[in-house]
Image (spheres, rainbow, N blue to C red):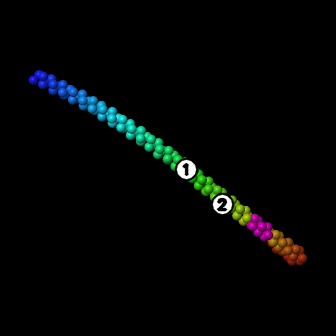
Amino acid sequence: QDKLAKEERSSTLNLRKLRTQWRAVLRETKDEELRRDIAILSQTFARVMDCKDGSLATDLEEAEEQHAQALRSHLHNVDRLLQLQRSRLTCLEEGYGAQLEALKTEFEAERYGAGEGQHWHP
């Protein structure tokens, strides 16, 4: 009986040791598996980031080109507007000069006519 009880205790102890060792093996295996997964995910992430960086650089270049094109177009339109305004101003100045000359001529004619006996009343 004593021998049987001793054997049961020994068996229970061995079973506990086996379970502890088995858990350690499982933990170690799981640890290696997780480390492999992390390494793979890390490499995948790095590749994705490289692709994104390349894509962002391309997008940025395209956006800068579009901005430069829009700026060139805007400056061209401003130049045309200035040209139109200069032409308009020249026409207005010429019209003003012509009207001024006509007024002077008319004034001279009236003054000359008033000097010959016609009375001019302001």
Figure quadrant of residue 35? top left
Direction from residue 79 to residue 53 in the image, left or right: left
Residue 108, given in percent of the width and then of the height, sits at: 85, 72
Q: Which mark is residue 58?
A: 1
SS of the residue under disc 2: helix
| Total numbered badges shown on the rendered structure | 2
Figure quadrant of residue 67? bottom right
Image point 78% across, 67% down: which residue?
A: 94
Front: mark 1 or 2? 1
Q: Quadrant of the C terminus?
A: bottom right
Q: Residues within 10 Å of mark 1 (few under 14, many from 20)?
A: few
The Cα atoms of the two marked residues, 1 and 2, are separated by 29 Å
Q: Residues within 10 Å of mark 2 (few under 14, many from 20)?
A: few
Predominant SS of the magenta segment: helix
Direction from residue 86 to residue 102 in the image, left or right: right
Image point 57% across, 53% down: which residue?
A: 62
Q: Earlier in the sequence, mark 1 or mark 2?
A: 1
The magenta stretch spans residue 93 = yes
Start-end of magenta stretch: 90-99
The kind of residue on which mark 2 rests is Asn
Image point 38% across, 40% down: which residue?
A: 37
Residue 107, given in percent of the width and then of the height, sits at: 83, 72
Image point 70% across, 64% down: which residue?
A: 84
The kind of residue on which mark 1 rests is Thr
The residue carrying mark 2 is 77
Q: Which mark is residue 50?
A: none
Q: Nearer the viewer, residue 5 or 83?
A: 5
SS of the residue under disc 1: helix
Residue 87, given in percent of the width and then of the height, sits at: 73, 64
